[in-house]
Image (tube, grey):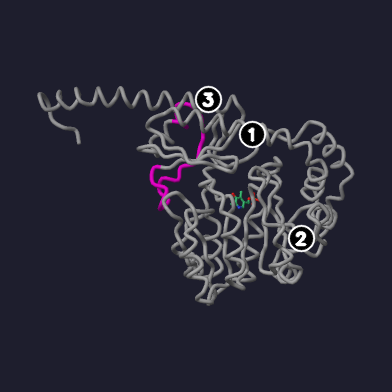
């Protein structure tokens, strides 16, 4: 055949997730930890890899890691599900609680994967926009939930890409208002230090998502986990890929989890760097900085896409451009990196903005010259 019939119609309006995997010297686009694993841990993993049975399928449920996570959270293993990154678990949630004829709520601007997985699974997406300051519109959300047709609610807390933390009282109101499955996505928990875990015993509809990709320096290995009621976890096991978390990732994530106190100093350090980053952006009159409870900062600057391009092309600094996302016009998001990386980003911003001032002045002359002389090149 010289052609292939089209795929499901849902895909027509979808654009593949573009993580902008662009090469740059300073990578501040994906909210990763700027540091690799501590050397001792790397050595330990290197040793263990030599005796690893690569020929054997991994443990489907990552039992060792699962039990460690359960114990640390005062739960049973049956309350924990480990996934190939948090992304896989979000997809599993929509496979099990979404689907054709079912409805998911998200609160944009927020994590793009909720909407993408909704489309992929044929789930109807109801978006309740955040307010101008990126806080959740509680009245609109609770009002919509009273309609009783919602099957699942996705709340990133703190929210990505805005950094906003929701009041706990509002989240409790949500859990009380509906029997829909409520995902509280705590991908940045280690930075915000806020969790809904204490409310699990009273709310069978609460699931909490965490990841090893951000604070724990394991974005490259893909590991995340859900905490939830055992009945919820049991349903998710029906839809998941049985061997999604490979043997090496299971071993490395368990080692990292065991050693997690080692990461505390680094996390505190990143929080101080975040203050430095916010203060630095705060000195630029052209920039509006939003508060953040995570390891990234959202800011608004005129002609953001041009700034994004100049940062990359001229300074080899990669940040994330959200300027085409509704509600985030002229917004860029920068990850909290090392001091050196932040200084380099701030210096680049200073130079770009300074040049823009100069160009604006020069622009007056250029326009005058054009009027006086030749033709406009358009
Ligand atoms: C990064 C992130 C995740 C999950 O990332 P993984 O690398 O797939 O574990 C989930 N939710 C939010 C809001 C995130 O920012």
N-terminal of the pair, mark 3 or mark 2, is 2
Q: Which residue is drawn at 42% across and 31% down?
A: 310
N-terminal of the pair, mark 3 or mark 1, is 1
N-terminal of the pair, mark 1 or mark 2, is 2
The numbered disc on residue 270 is: 1
Q: Name the residue under label 2.
A: 80
Asked which secondary structure carries label 2, the reply is strand
Asked which secondary structure carries label 3, the reply is helix
Q: Which residue is drawn at 70% across and 65% down?
A: 240
Nearer to me, 378 or 139:
139
Pair 1/2: label in front: 1
Asked which secondary structure carries label 1, the reply is helix
**Residue 112 relative to residue 49: left or right:** left
Q: Name the residue under label 3.
A: 344
Quick one: which residue is furthest to the front in this view? 169
Q: What stretch is highlighted in magenta?
A: 311-330
Q: In which quarter of the image is the C terminus?
A: top left
Give above or below for 31 relative to 108.
above
């Amino acid at each position: 055949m010289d052609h292939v019939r089209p795929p499901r119609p849902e895909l027509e309006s979808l654009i593949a997730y573009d993580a902008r995997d662009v090469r740059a010297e300073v990578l501040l686009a994906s909210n990763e930890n700027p540091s690799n694993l501590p050397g001792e841990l790397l050595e330990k993993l290197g040793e263990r890899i030599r005796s690893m049975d690569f020929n054997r399928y991994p443990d489907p449920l990552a039992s060792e890691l699962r039990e460690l996570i359960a114990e640390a959270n005062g739960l049973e293993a049956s309350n924990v599900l480990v996934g190939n990154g948090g992304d896989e678990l979000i997809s599993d949630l929509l496979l099990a609680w979404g689907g054709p004829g079912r409805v998911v709520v998200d609160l944009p601007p927020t994590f793009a994967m909720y909407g993408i997985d909704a489309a992929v699974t044929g789930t109807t997406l109801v978006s309740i926009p955040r307010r101008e300051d990126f806080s959740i519109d509680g009245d609109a959300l609770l009002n919509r939930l009273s309609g009783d047709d919602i099957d699942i609610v996705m709340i990133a807390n703190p929210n990505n890409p805005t950094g906003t933390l929701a009041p706990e009282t509002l989240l409790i109101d949500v859990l009380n208002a509906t029997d829909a499955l409520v995902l509280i996505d705590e991908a940045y928990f280690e930075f915000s230090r806020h969790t809904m875990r204490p409310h699990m015993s009273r709310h069978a509809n609460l699931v909490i998502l965490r990841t090893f990709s951000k604070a724990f320096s394991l974005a490259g290995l893909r590991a995340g986990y859900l905490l939830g009621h055992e009945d919820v976890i049991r349903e998710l096991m029906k839809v998941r890929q049985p061997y999604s978390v490979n043997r090496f990732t299971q071993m490395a994530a368990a080692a990292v989890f065991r050693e997690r106190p080692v990461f505390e100093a680094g996390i505190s350090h990143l929080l101080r760097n975040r203050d430095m980053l916010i203060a630095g952006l705060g000195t630029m009159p052209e920039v509006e900085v939003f508060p953040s409870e995570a390891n990234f900062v959202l800011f608004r600057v005129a002609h953001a896409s041009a700034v994004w391009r100049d940062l990359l092309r001229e300074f080899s600094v990669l940040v994330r451009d959200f300027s085409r996302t509704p509600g985030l016009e002229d917004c860029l998001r920068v990850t909290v990196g090392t001091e050196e990386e932040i200084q380099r980003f701030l210096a680049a911003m200073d130079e770009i903005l300074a040049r823009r001032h100069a160009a604006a002045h020069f622009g007056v002359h250029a326009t005058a010259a054009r009027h006086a002389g030749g033709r406009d090149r358009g």
